[in-house]
Image (tube, rainbow, N blue to C red):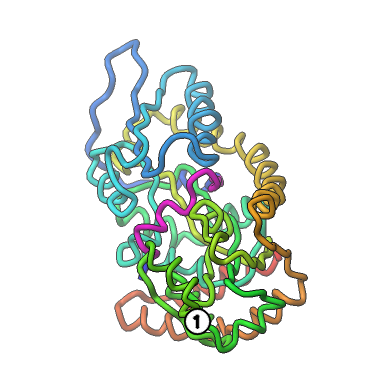
Amino acid sequence: MSQDRSEAIDGVSRRLFLTSTACMAAMRSLPAAAQSEPGLPRVLRFTDHEPLGGMRTRFLQDVLFPAIERESGGRLKIEARWDGEVAAAYDALAVVANGTSDMGTVVPEYTAEELPLHQVFKSFVRGPAGQRQVDFFNRVYAELPQFRIELEKNDIVPVFFGTGYPVAFFSSSPLADLGELRGGKWRSASFWHLDYLKNAGATPVKMHWGPEIAAALKAKTLDGLMVNVDSGYMLKVHETAPHVLVSKNLWLGHLYLLAMNRSVWHDLQQEDREAIVRAARKSYPMLGGVMETSFDAQLAELRNAGADARILRGEEVSRFEASTDYREVQSSWARDQERLGIPGTAAVIAKVSSILGEFI
């Protein structure tokens, strides 16, 4: 029930990463991994499914990785492999967990069975933007050990984590407000969003991402797409669905974890683990600032490309949130997880909701 593979590229040139404060949690004893030769830096192999050049990947290459090397006094060096050279997005968790790569970008939505609790983030309709996203995720990981434990069970440790830009509605016909979703056929890849579209009165559509989407929009057999705004632009959705409604507070909740193999993390010297945490922490202000200012630039790019893009008013977002009946959808999903043997899911949703409320 994760986003389809084609939308794994939906963050190309846009997604930004946030820093986790939970990665210093205690780890159980593991066999030591091989060390580098005395006097030489410890080389940490990193894999990412996206090409180097987008905003997210450049942030890692130009900001985070140099900071790790600098804070460690040169004892650590990152050897990065991009564009799925080592692993595709859907395979990254296994590749990092089995030690094929020391570090990698892990997308929890692509591994819903292994990381069920991490699906909770996408279940909310509204959420914070920019620096407040940074603060929100730090609070969650600091206060809810269930997320760290879930990662630990999969033999990975969170080092740095991020999210994407907000959700937008791309329509082939003029869309005055989100009330006009009712009666239309709307495509989304998220299982949460499909339920929310249905509850808002639309007919949810699951469709493979490819030429058939543009063809369906032109033929009026599909009215629009509910997709993150940067994905819509990068995949040129606006060419066939040029009417766009968006808000910074239409939450995506799509995490991109920079994770480390748990045994490798445990094997690092304490001073090097602390260096990684310092490097992540010092990236906060730069990251938050970029996220705050780049949203308007994306809208300008859409408009320059011919799209009619409007920012929704706060009350419009609230009305859409109410129409989705998202709390009942969350409760139903939590009951399913309980039946699958994952206890405490409802309590996790309640706690995340409480923290989220402080940042909206």
Say if 115 sits above or below 28 in the image.
Answer: below
With respect to residue 116, does 42 lie above or below? above
Q: Quadrant of residue 80?
A: top left
Q: Amino acid at mark 1?
A: Lys
Question: For residue 17: magenta?
Answer: yes
Q: Residues within 10 Å of mark 1 (few under 14, many from 20)?
A: many
Task: Point out residue 61 in the picture as x, y percentages from the top left corner.
Answer: 48, 30
Q: Nearer the viewer, residue 13 or 218?
A: 218
Quadrant for the C terminus in the image: bottom right
Toward which corner of the image does residue 344 lie, by quadrant? bottom left
Residue drawn at (43%, 80%) of the image: 334
Q: Residue at x 50, y 67 (%)?
A: 122
Question: Which residue occupies the foreground of this view, 234 or 349?
Answer: 234
Q: What percent of the width, then of the height, locates residue 347?
A: 50, 76
Q: Is residue 169 left or right of residue 58?
A: right
In magenta stretch: residue 340: no
Kindly identify the residue that appears in the image at 73 percent across and 76 percent down: 316
Quarter of the rendering containing residue 127: bottom right
Q: Is residue 276 left or right of residue 27?
A: right
Count of numbered circles on the image: 1
User: In percent of the image, x 42 and y 51: which residue is there?
Assistant: 9
Which residue is denoted by mark 1 in the rendering?
185
Can you give x and y, in whole percent of width and height, for residue 77 in the image?
40, 23
When the figure is inspected, residue 19 is found, relative to residue 200, above or below; the finding is above
Helix, strand or loop at label 1? It is strand
Measured as percent of width and height from the top left, residue 64 is found at: 52, 32
Which quarter of the rendered picture does the N terminus lie within? bottom left
Which of 298 and 87 lies nearest the eye of the viewer?
298
Bounds of the magenta segment: 3-18
